[in-house]
Amino acid sequence: MQTILGANGTIGSVLAKELAIYTDKIRLVSRSPRKVNETDELFPADLSNPSIVDQAVSGSDVVYLVVGFDYKLKIWEEQWPRIMRATLDACIKYKTRLVFFDNVYSYDINSIPHMTEDSPYNPPSKKGAVRKQIAQMIMDEVKSGRLLALIARSADFYGPDNKNSMVTQMIYNNLLKGKSASWPVDKNKKHSFTFTPDAAKATALLGNTNDAYNTVWHLPTDKNSLTGSQIIELFAREMKVSSRSSVVPVWMFNIIGIFVPVMKELSEMMYQYDRDYFFDSSKFDKRFKTTSYQEGVRITVNAKS
C-alpha cells in the first residue's frame, strides 16, 4: 500500500496517476478524496488529528506527505509541526517509508541564485522558518536510525491544472483576459519553475527507489532558466496574444493585501524575485528527462484551452 496524505492538492492527484505504474494499492487521504485510479482506496480524514493520521498511515509501505495548507503564516505555524510530528510517529510505528514534498523556503537568501541540495538552511522569512523546522524534524529521525525518509524539493510550480500558481494567476489568466501579464519586483531576473507533471513523476520514482532514501532531492527542473520577460513571452507566443507586461513592486503587495489577504502573505517572499533564482536539479537529471520550458508552456496552454 502506498498512501498520499493531501491527495486532492496540486501534486497529490497527479502523483496518484504516477504511482499506478508501481502499485495498484493506493490510498488517497484528504477531507474529501476523489478516485484517480479505479482501484484507489479513499480515506476521508481531518489530518489535523494525530490519531487519524495514525489510522491513515497504518498498513502503508510508503507515505507521501503532500499536504497544502492555506497560505497563512498562523496556520503554517500551528498545523505544520503538528501534522509532521503525527506523520513521523506513525511512520516509525508502522515501519513506513516517508516521502515529504517540500519547497525552497528554508534556504539561505544568498543561495537563491544557485540552489542545490547542499545549500544551507537559514530562511529569511517566517514561513521559511516553519519549513526549516519540519525538514529538520525529518532528518533528525533519519539520523536516529528510526526512519527511512527522503525530502523531494521543488521550485515554484507551473503546469496544467495548477490554478493557484503565480504563473497561472499573474501571466496566463491576465493574458487570457486581454490584460497585461504581471511579474513581481523585477522581470529581468531569471526564475526557475518546476513543471508539475515532472514533479509528480519524479516523486513517485524516488518513493519507489530503495537507494533514494535518507537524503534530499531536487525535483527535475529545466536548467535553461528564463527571465520573467522570457517566460511571459513564451506564454504570449503560445496563446497567440501580445506579450504586454507590468511589474508589481513589493510595496504594492501590502496595499493589495488589504483587500486580498494572500497578497500580503506573499510580500515576505519577494526576496525570491529581486535576484536570479536558479534551482539546480543536476543530481536528479542524471536519472530522469526534464521537460523544457518551451514544451511545458505548450502543454499548459493546450490543457487550459
Image (tube, rainbow, N blue to C red):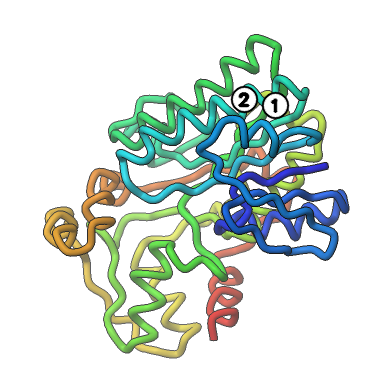
Whole-number angstrom distance, CA of label 2 to CA of label 1? 5 Å
> What secondary structure is found at the residue carrying circle 2?
helix
The N terminus sits in image quarter: top right
Please identify the quarter of the rendering in which residue 183 is found. Answer: bottom left
Q: Nearer the viewer, residue 28 or 268?
A: 28
Residue 236 in picture, x, y percent from top left: 41, 81
The C terminus sits in image quarter: bottom right
In the displayed structure, does residue 106 sit left or right of residue 18?
left
- Residue depicted at 60% across the width and 37% down the height: 100
Few, some or many C-alpha atoms within 10 Å of disc 2 (few <14, some 14-19, many ≥20)? many
Residue 248 in picture, x, y percent from top left: 20, 63
Few, some or many C-alpha atoms within 10 Å of disc 1 (few <14, some 14-19, many ≥20)? many
Q: Amino acid at mark 2?
A: Leu
Q: Is residue 165 above or below residue 68?
A: below
Q: Nearer the viewer, residue 109 or 52?
A: 52
In the displayed structure, does residue 44 sit left or right of residue 175?
right
Q: Nearer the viewer, residue 164 or 117?
A: 164
Please identify the quarter of the rendering in which residue 114 is found. Answer: top left
- Residue depicted at 60% across the width and 51% down the height: 30
Q: Which mark identifies residue 194?
A: none
- Residue depicted at 27% across the width and 80% down the height: 180
Q: Which residue is mark 1?
A: 91
Q: Amino acid at mark 1?
A: Cys
Residue 96 in picture, x, y percent from top left: 76, 28
> What secondary structure is found at the residue carrying circle 1?
helix
- Residue depicted at 81% across the width and 34% down the height: 59
Q: Is residue 115 above or below residue 118?
A: below
Residue 243 in picture, x, y percent from top left: 34, 81
Q: Nearer the viewer, residue 157 or 247?
A: 157
Do callouts 2 and 1 mark residues in contact (Cβ within 8 Å)?
A: yes
Q: Which mark identifies residue 88?
A: 2
